[in-house]
Image (cartoon, grey):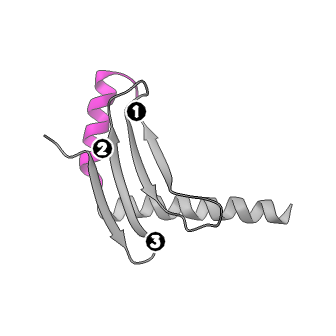
Amino acid sequence: MKPFAKLYQSDEIGQVLATLHLTGEDMPEIHIHFDPEVEGIGLSAAKIGFPDTEEGEELARKAFDLITEEGAIGVAQMAIANIRSMLSEEETQ
């Protein structure tokens, strides 16, 4: 059985969990889970979707196999920066 989760640890942002989602009613997806450590926001995830076809499922599997610690942490860092930016924009409006 191939792995469906990869857990990484970052000194800057803590744990980052990458998961592969192939079953269910939704299209195949890869989720990158992280805690943005922003007041009022809990555990968050960046999602990468693939076509809801056999080819899309195979693409999702291949992409998941290629995820590295550096890549997963980079996605989480970008998402955290976007969350913080959105919240700071709300404060200035």
- Residue identified by numbered label 3: 13
Answer left or right for 91 relative to 50: right
Residue 28's image quarter?
top left
Extreme residue toward the top, this view: 53
* Horizontal and vertical percent position of residue 12: 45, 76
Q: In this view, does 42 lie above or below 25?
A: below
**Contact between labelled residues 1 and 2, with CB atoms less than 8 Å apart:** yes
User: Which kind of residue does numbered mark 2 sit on?
Assistant: Ala
Q: Which residue is drawn at 58% across and 65% down?
A: 81
Question: Would you call the spot at circle 2 few (<14 residues within 10 Å), some (14-19), or many (20 or more)?
Answer: some
Question: Viewer-proximal residue, 81 or 2?
Answer: 2
Answer left or right for 10 relative to 76: left
Answer left or right for 76 relative to 21: right
Magenta region's main secondary structure?
Answer: helix
Q: Which residue is drawn at 56% across and 68% down?
A: 37
Magenta stretch? Answer: 50-67
Q: What element carries label 1?
A: loop
The quarter of the image holding the N terminus is top left
Q: Which of marks 3 and 1 is in front?
A: 3
- Residue identified by numbered label 1: 50
User: Which kind of residue does numbered mark 1 sit on?
Assistant: Phe
Q: Is residue 33 above or below residue 60?
A: below
**Marked residue nearer the N-terminal end (2 or 1):** 1
Question: Viewer-proximal residue, 23 or 72?
Answer: 23
Q: Is mark 2 on a helix, strand or loop?
A: helix
